[in-house]
Image (spheres, helix red, strand yellow):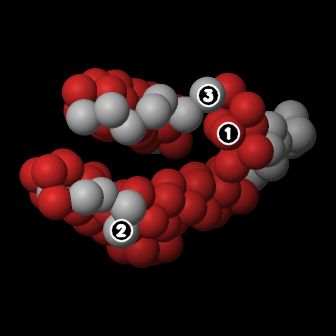
Amino acid sequence: MAHELLDDYHAKIAAMTDDLIEIGLSVDIPEPGIVEAVQAFQPTQAKNRNPQETLNDIRVIFTDIADMMQAIGTQLDDEQRYIQSKIDEYIYYLRKEADYRLARM
């Protein structure tokens, strides 16, 4: 079950990322580079962990991503406000998964 859930999350996060990057580039918001990604999410060490620890790590990452998306929303100018509804949709999904589904597993 955990592997299927992780595969599903991987696909959804990849789709969100692609979508937001395409939208951002269309309104001249620069795409984050590898340096920013590494700074935001330091690679975690490979280690043996139980499924609960993995789900906890994912929960923290989802919350961090939602917080970053929230911060981006505050930087949009009036011409970029239409992006906010898409960001809000993704924030809702990430927080729902983190606060309800993952927190209760």
Tell me, yes or no, whether the two marked residues, 3 and 1, touch with CB atoms within 8 Å.
yes
Q: Horizontal and vertical percent for residue 22?
A: 28, 25
Question: Is residue 39 among what the camera can see?
Answer: yes
Q: Label 2 crowding class (10 Å Cα cut-off): few <14, some 14-19, many 20+? A: few
Three-letter amino acid code of the residue under disc 3: Gly
Tell me, yes or no, whether the two marked residues, 2 and 3, touch with CB atoms within 8 Å.
no
Dot 1 corresponds to which residue?
Answer: 36
Residue located 16% across and 60% down the image: 78
Three-letter amino acid code of the residue under disc 1: Glu
Separation of marks 2 and 3 at Cα, in angstroms: 20 Å
Q: In terms of secondary structure, where does tag 2 sit?
A: loop
Q: Give the quarter of the image for residue 36.
A: top right
Residue 19 placement, left or right of 52: left
Q: How many marks are shown on the rendered structure? A: 3
Residue 55's place in the image compared with 39, above or below, is below
Q: In terms of secondary structure, where does tag 3 sit?
A: loop
* Front one among 52 and 64: 64
Dot 3 corresponds to which residue?
Answer: 33
Residue 86 placement, left or right of 70: left
* Front one among 40 and 80: 80
Dot 2 corresponds to which residue?
Answer: 74
Earlier in the chain: of badge 2 and badge 3, it is 3
Separation of marks 2 and 1 at Cα, in angstroms: 19 Å
Earlier in the chain: of badge 2 and badge 1, it is 1
Separation of marks 3 and 1 at Cα, in angstroms: 5 Å
Residue located 58% across and 55% down the image: 61
